[in-house]
Image (spheres, rainbow, N blue to C red):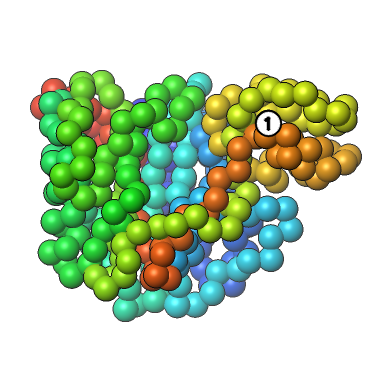
Amino acid sequence: MKAGYIASRVREKTRGYVEVGRPVIDICNFVEDNIKKLGGAPAFPCNVDIDRVAAHYTSPLGDPTVITDGTLVKIDIGVHVEGYIADTAVTICLEPRHTAMVEAAEAGLEAAIKMVRAGVAASDIGAAIENAIKSRGFAPIRNLTGHRMSRYIVHAGQSIPNIGGTNGYRLKEGEVYAIEPFAVPRDAAGQVIDGAPSNIYRFLKKRKVKSDAAKKMLKLIQARHRSLPFASRWVVGGVSGGAEAFGELVEGKCVHSYPQLVERSGAPVAQAEHTMIVESDGCTVTTA
């Protein structure tokens, strides 16, 4: 609940911080710094996903990217308190003609929340999301889903689809889910594919590395981040030979690199997301 409260506060504060000309790395730092000020820790790097990028972009050190006019900017925020996670996202619309699409994603999320309770099938929630988005003249992204979370694990197995008929798993009381509908224009592909590297990583396996710097960095990653995703800029900056040591960890497959997820036809993407705890007769939204 505390993680959800922090995530909600930071999300709403960030709405007013995203503006044309703002460097993306400043947004990432703003989100992550505010999470820490409120007593939490980032559960994953702040994602700033622009237009056709649906998920998994965070700034590297020295990122020159800035927010430009006429774009859709998704801010995806993860917070943990002692490993207990809250995950929430909002779309900042800097192009008025896409406002209805943002509202469609939000309507999909609202429809899902009304469905969540112990015993409901994940596919029924997906159908509610799909119907809400399609009824407003848009389409959901078919191969992106919401996800169950557990302590120190952002993706803990079960998923919540954004379309109907694909998952018969029935939710259980006490489970925690992040549900995140994505909306695109009706004539878009409605699928994401892997794009360029995202600058987001997670610890994969302890393996032998040659340099002392790489050995030290690997121990630091394990101690600080456990199984949670982290940004390359969190571990490379301020360390002598940091870039070379990190490159050694990537090459040695000690850490896993996430790709950006981009809409296959190049269409802009809108996103909305909340975290909720499943109850016998409904749910508690921790990030409201």
Residue 285 position within the rendered picture, expressed as x and y whole percent measured from the top left: 27, 36
236 on left or right of 197: right
Instruction: Answer above or below: position of 121 versus 89.
Output: above
Q: Nearer the viewer, residue 103 or 185?
A: 185
Can you see residue 1?
yes
Q: Quadrant of residue 242?
A: top right
Tell me if residue 117 can be seen.
no
Hey, what amino acid is under mark 1? Cys
Percent position (x, y) of residue 34? Answer: 55, 43
- 244 or 273: nearer the viewer: 244
Relative placement, left or right, of 54 versus 208 is left
The residue drawn where x is 39% and y is 70% is: 265
Q: Which residue is mark 1?
A: 254
Q: Nearer the viewer, residue 275 or 220?
A: 220
Is 168 located above or below residue 19 in the figure?
above
Question: What's the residue at 32%, 42% (across, down)?
Answer: 146
Image quadrant of residue 5? top left
The residue drawn where x is 53% and y is 58% is 195
> What is the quadrant of the N terminus in the image?
top left
Secondary-structure class at tag 1: loop
Going 73% across and 34% down the picture, which residue do you hit? 252
